Amino acid sequence: EVQLVESGGGLVQPGGSLRLSCVASGFTFSSYAMTWVRQAPGKGLEWVSSITSGGTSSIPDSVKGRFTISRDNAKNTLYLQMNSLKIDDTAVYYCVRGSAVSSPLRGQGTQVTVSS
């Protein structure tokens, strides 16, 4: 059974940082691209970043220069380092197996709230 468990969310002030983690199990993690998506209140899913099985990352302009995706295949773990957080970054963040934003293979999510 595919399992993805996110952690690391919380309440942070604008300009602060958080590091999200996603521990994967039930599949060969190193063989799959992985993706972070987010969903803000009342909005649809938004792509945040992706990383290939080989470690090549892609990231949209909305978070480029602030967010970094990485992976540790030995630990079956995906990371998202988020710096210079903005109020608009408030959302539930999900990790997804693969590169499709709407894939049902995602975790339960972790809440990130940016507020002063």
Image (spheres, rainbow, N blue to C red):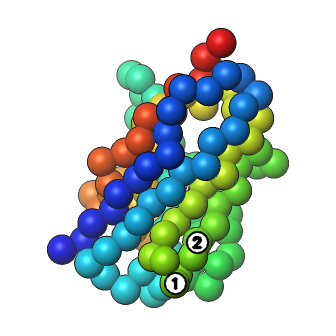
The percent coordinates of residue 48 (x first, y second) are: 58, 49
Left or right? Give the position of 95 relative to 106: right
Inspect the image, locate mark 1, and give the three-letter code of the amino acid beneath it: Ala
The percent coordinates of residue 19 (x first, y second) are: 61, 49
Residue 9 position (above or below residue 47): above
Quadrant for the N terminus in the image: bottom left
Q: Residues within 10 Å of mark 1 (few under 14, many from 20)?
A: few
Inspect the image, locate mark 2, and give the three-letter code of the amino acid beneath it: Arg
Question: Which residue is depicted at the point 45% across and 76% down?
Answer: 76
The answer to whether any part of residue 21 appears in the image is yes
The answer to whether any part of residue 39 appears in the image is no
Q: Secondary structure at mark 1?
A: helix
Question: Which residue is depicted at the point 50% across and 46% down?
Answer: 8
Badge number at residue 113: none
- What residue did someone put label 1 on? 74
Question: Which residue is depicted at the point 31% across and 74% down?
Answer: 25
Question: Which residue is depicted at the point 37% across and 45% down?
Answer: 109
The percent coordinates of residue 50 (x first, y second) are: 58, 63
Residue 110 position (above or below residue 16): below
